[in-house]
Image (cartoon, rainbow, N blue to C red):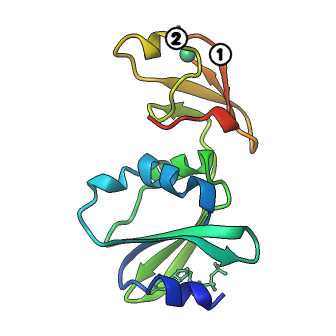
Amino acid sequence: MKDKQLSVSAIKEGTVIDHVPAGVLFKVVSILKLDKVGTMITIGNNLESKKLGHKGIIKISKVFFEDNEINKIALVAPSAKLNIIREYEVVEKKVVTIPDEIVGIVKCVNPKCITNNEKVTTRFDVVSKPEVRLRCHYCEKITDRDNIEIL
Ligand code: CTP
Ligand code: ZN
């Protein structure tokens, strides 16, 4: 477990998202719109992990997310663990929970869906957890976990 601290250095203040499965790390980056964040971000991927085999870690300095914002990542990374860092110390640990409704992050699988043809924000009910299945509010088609495409 000490390896990862050598791979990606400690931060002074901010959020550490740990135990992200390696294959979805960049989906998490996209869901949280980290390309729009101006503070220091350090990312490690394919790090060794006893629990996950290979994992990813994302450290975002000086940013503390609202629960409803960070919970969106549970769609693709339900195993993620959040660590809130203040003055170099972990002051809080949190897990993510899958929301009941998803607005505007995921693309509907149905090419004929209005959301794929007009300027309409996608909206889904989460009809199964933790193996996520999403039912489109507009066309009722099911988008399952493996088909989730982030907008
Ligand atoms: N971390 C960090 N900067 C700090 C303190 C911690 O980036 N100033 C990171 C560590 O690298 C680790 C995570 O925050 O990835 C959690 O830290 P800690 O609780 O000390 O590590 P573990 O005991 O290994 O946590 P867990 O087993 O809960 O993953
Ligand atoms: Zn649809």
**Residue sitting at 36 percent across and 85 percent down?**
12
Q: Are marks 1 and 2 in contact (CB under 8 Å)?
A: yes
Q: Is mark 1 within 8 Å of ligand 2?
A: yes
Provide residue 98's location: percent of width, then percent of height.
63, 46
Q: Which mark is residue 141?
A: 1
Ligand 2 - quadrant of the structure image: top right
Left or right of residue 50: residue 122: left
Q: Is mark 2 within 8 Å of ligand 2?
A: yes
Local secondary structure at mark 1: loop
Q: Can you see residue 96?
A: no
Give the alpha-carbon distance from disc 1 to disc 2, as whole Å. 9 Å
Q: Quadrant of residue 147?
A: top right
Q: Which mark is residue 130?
A: none
**Residue sitting at 58 percent across and 53 percent down?**
24
14 vs 124: above or below: below
Camera-side residue: 81 or 53? 53
